Amino acid sequence: MSTTDVKQSIITADATFKTAIGGTVAIARARVKGVSGLATGANAIIKLYDGSDATGTLKYQMQWGASDGDTWNEYIAEDGILFTEGIYGDVTNCDLATIIFD
């Protein structure tokens, strides 16, 4: 049986991603391997910043959806996207954003 360091974190509003769902410890250095979202309307947006707020470096941005309930799922190949100072999510027209990270 193999083991993995891959984890999941979810936000439902603009926030810093935590090391565990419902947790209080912010993710520090990590590689994002996947991003998913659930739209509340047209033109949903997920932005991921390297840092603890939206003043950090924008490292990922996706816009999708035509209506409420549209989903977005993206798996990021190779080593993923490196975040060295934490991961802050900024969501627009989005019920939730999920990241897969290690």
Image (cartoon, helix red, strand yellow):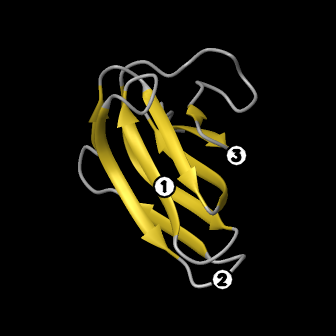
Q: Is residue 101 left or right of residue 10?
A: left
**Residue at 71% of width from left, 22% of height from top?**
23
Residue 78 locus on image (x, y percent): 23, 51
Vertical position of residue 34 compared to residue 87: above or below: below
Disc 3: which residue: 12
> Identity of the amino acid at label 2?
Ser
Lower position in the chain sequence, tag 1 or tag 3: 3
Q: Residues within 10 Å of mark 1 (few under 14, many from 20)?
A: many
Q: Secondary structure at mark 1?
A: strand
Lower position in the chain sequence, tag 2 or tag 1: 1
Residue furthest left in the image? 78
Image mark for residue 67? 2
Q: Is residue 96 left or right of residue 88?
A: right
Q: Secondary structure at mark 2?
A: loop
The N terminus sits in image quarter: top right
Disc 1: which residue: 46
Vertical position of residue 27 compared to residue 31: above or below: above
